[in-house]
Amino acid sequence: MSANPFGLVLISSPEEYHQRVAADAEHQLVNLLDLIPDLVLDIRYATSRNLLGEAVYPSAKAYLRRPVAEALQRVQQALARQGLGLCVYDAYRPYSVTVRFYEHIRDENFAAPPWRGSRHNRGCSVDVGLVEQATGRHLPLPTDFDELKPASHATFSALPNHVILNRSTLLAAMKRQGFVNYPKEWWHFDFHRWADFDLLDLSFEALDMR
């Protein structure tokens, strides 16, 4: 493991990643649908419906480190008691994709800079919305995913009451399981132990090798 030109230490070797996992199973990136089969996925970065206007993931998959995935499973179970469930827009993101986003947006409020990297690169951040479990219908929330506007802020108040209620339901359910909201994006949550995990630049294909 060596530092990149920005001085960040990244794991970009599948072999090194698997060695870490063998030493500590918490470091495993878990395919979320394997752990939470009733999760709804809307992985925008596997489509052209995103900030770049082109697919940056080869497939619509979502991965998180094992303790993060297990915490998200508990969120899903709690929401199910209200007839609700999670929709995941993004989870683990390779560092190289974060670099592409920053080069396109050039705004640290909405894209992690290459010299810092993203908590998504650690497999410890997840972007989520809410759905009705019975129908799969998306509940109204303040904006669409990745809309970069004032209404995206988690405290924006000029909204219908039912939208504020839905946002509050999501924020509370995630907080109870150790997720911390990024206040400029109602959909973005960091697991409280994110600093325990390395930055990664592994492709989805590399993760699927085993």
Image (cartoon, helix red, strand yellow):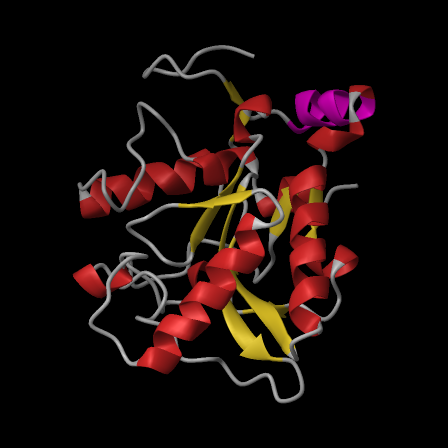
Residue 34 inside the magenta-drawn segment: no
User: Is 175 in front, or is 36?
Assistant: 175
User: Is 70 in front, or is 120?
Assistant: 70
Left or right of 185 in this view: 42? right
* Residue 187 rendering spot, x and y as whole percentages: 41, 58
Q: Is residue 133 above or below residue 119?
A: below
Q: Is residue 149 visible to the viewer in this orientation of the structure? A: no
State which quadrant residue 114 falls in: top left
Residue at coordinates 65% horizontally, 53% vertically from top-left?
Answer: 72
Q: Is residue 33 above or below residue 126?
A: below
Q: Characterize the magenta stretch by its predominant secondary structure.
A: helix
Left or right of 133 in this view: 117? left
* Residue 119 rendering spot, x and y as whole percentages: 46, 35
Residue at coordinates 69% horizontally, 72% vertically from top-left?
Answer: 80
Residue at coordinates 42% horizontally, 67% vertically from top-left?
Answer: 167
Q: Is residue 41 above or below residue 103?
A: below
Which segment is the magenta one? 14-22
User: Is 67 in front, or is 12?
Assistant: 67
Q: Is residue 84 visible to the viewer in this orientation of the structure? A: yes
